[in-house]
Amino acid sequence: MAGKAHPADEGGKDVIQLVVDFAREPAAAGRVVFLEDYEMTLARRLVQGVDVWLNTPRRPLEASGTSGMKAALNGVLNCSILDGWWAEAYSPACGFAIGDSEGPTSDAAQDEADAEALYAVLEDQVLPAYYERDEAGLPQRWIELMRESIAELGPRFGTARMVAEYVERLYLPAHEGASRVASRVA
């Protein structure tokens, strides 16, 4: 496991500390490892060897979602709460949704609902897609999800689209507005 909490997110920091403490316990017996100092270099290395990008933010606190986008572009399947970019990007053809976009009003109720939804999606969707193999030993459903994730999400969440949208929606209108103002002043 790897990740970091926002500096002002005391609850998030507490959860990470619990994971770190658990990983150090003899009961974990090396089956859980927490990788510290999560940043771009570590993220790049993780993406290269990951099958599922699990993201469980508390709604509506998802950040930009760039790590999930990067994972998708590398054929890693997202399994996430429907918040932030995943609420916009999710399709059953290219990943997994934990719960729905609505949730209980209290944090405790939301956490319980999200935990139940996570276990259900793992048991009913993620694990069958990963472990069902054809006669050659290949997980065909998983491979199809990976292909669809790259094909569907790459064009929608890549830098080329972002720059084009920035130019069309922000730069050109600002430039045209400035030109009109300049012509009125002259």
Image (tube, rainbow, N blue to C red):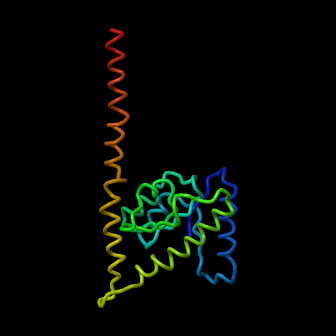
Which of the 4 image quadrants contains residue 137?
A: bottom left
Name the spot of residue 143 as percent of width and height, x first. Answer: 33, 75
- In depth, the one of 56 and 100 nearer the eye is 100
Q: Residue furthest bottom?
A: 135
Name the spot of residue 55 as percent of width and height, x first. Answer: 52, 64
Q: Is residue 183 left or right of residue 110?
A: left
Q: Residue furthest top?
A: 186
Camera sees residue 167 = yes
| Residue that appears at 32% across and 67% down | 148
Which of the 4 image quadrants contains residue 139?
A: bottom left
| Residue that appears at 70% across and 62% down | 14
- In depth, the one of 25 and 60 nearer the eye is 60
Name the spot of residue 26 as percent of width and height, x first. Answer: 69, 83
155 over 77 or under it: above or below: above
| Residue that appears at 53% across and 75% down | 120
56 over 159 or under it: above or below: below
